[in-house]
Image: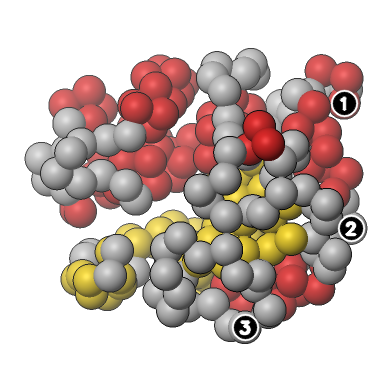
Amino acid sequence: MTSATIPEPLVRLARLMATFGPDWFLCGGWAVDAWVGRQTRDHQDVDVTVFEEDQLSLFDYLSGWQLVAHDQRVAGDTSEPWDGRPLVLPAHIHARPDGAESPSRLSRPADQGFGLEILLNERSDGDWILSRGLQYVGVELSSRPQIAMPLAGCARLSAWGLPTVVPEVLLFYKATAYFDSKGLRPADEQDFTVLAPHLGKAQRSWLRAAVAQIYPNHPWLAQLG
């Protein structure tokens, strides 16, 4: 597939990350679209994941960008620039080109142009740690089953030519990362409706079992059955 057929934000992403040495993968809503081959909804920004140990390389690589990091050490609405301090998982980084408005999570992407949300993830002994056994959920320490997948199976090139998180891992995060007493975010519900029909039997089985370990009464389980 030629670059002319790839949505413009992903063309910009490919150019930006072309010489970044460590592993990186497209995730979030644009990754859902990459697997179905079309844009299915509007996106606030482009979601990318890198691994925790590569955060300093990322900081150096995006020198000149506006970077705001969020982890357990700062207030959720911070707009203070990230100075490269080690981030504690779970953590993410909002990034905007120099000259754009503040990349605070409260800003609207329409005011900023092209922007990234970079999610830090953990790997260990060849596995991607998708859910840590003990982690912070909001500001509270929570005990969860540890769920991992061999790193080799977690991402591959999509038809748009970008390294992309596989569908079952995308939907695992969408099922569990923001699920609370209020339910699921509308965008995650929409992404599930779009992407779930593209899952193979083994993918559906893995996703159902993984989500059930964390949320045994999750509303998606019946649909995955």
> Which residue is rendered at x = 71% and y = 41% of the image?
112
Between 57 and 195, the one nearer to me in the picture? 57
Between the C-alphas of marks 2 and 1, the distance is 17 Å
How crowded pointer 2 is (Cα within 10 Å; few <14, some 14-19, many 20+) is rated as few
Residue 17 location in percent, x, y?
A: 82, 52
Is the residue under label 1 in contact with that under label 3 (CB below 8 Å)?
Answer: no
Disc 1 marks which amino acid?
A: Ser
Residue lying furthest bottom: 85
As measured in the structure, the alpha-carbon distance from the residue carrying label 3 to the one carrying label 2 is 23 Å
In this figure, which residue is indicated by the disc labeled 1?
3
Give the residue pinned by disc 3.
Answer: 85
Kind of residue indicated by mark 2: Thr
- The numbered mark at residue 19 is 2
Tag nearer the camera, 3 or 2: 3
Q: Are marks 3 and 2 in contact (CB under 8 Å)?
A: no
Q: Is residue 66 visible?
A: yes
On the image, which quarter does residue 58 sit in? bottom right
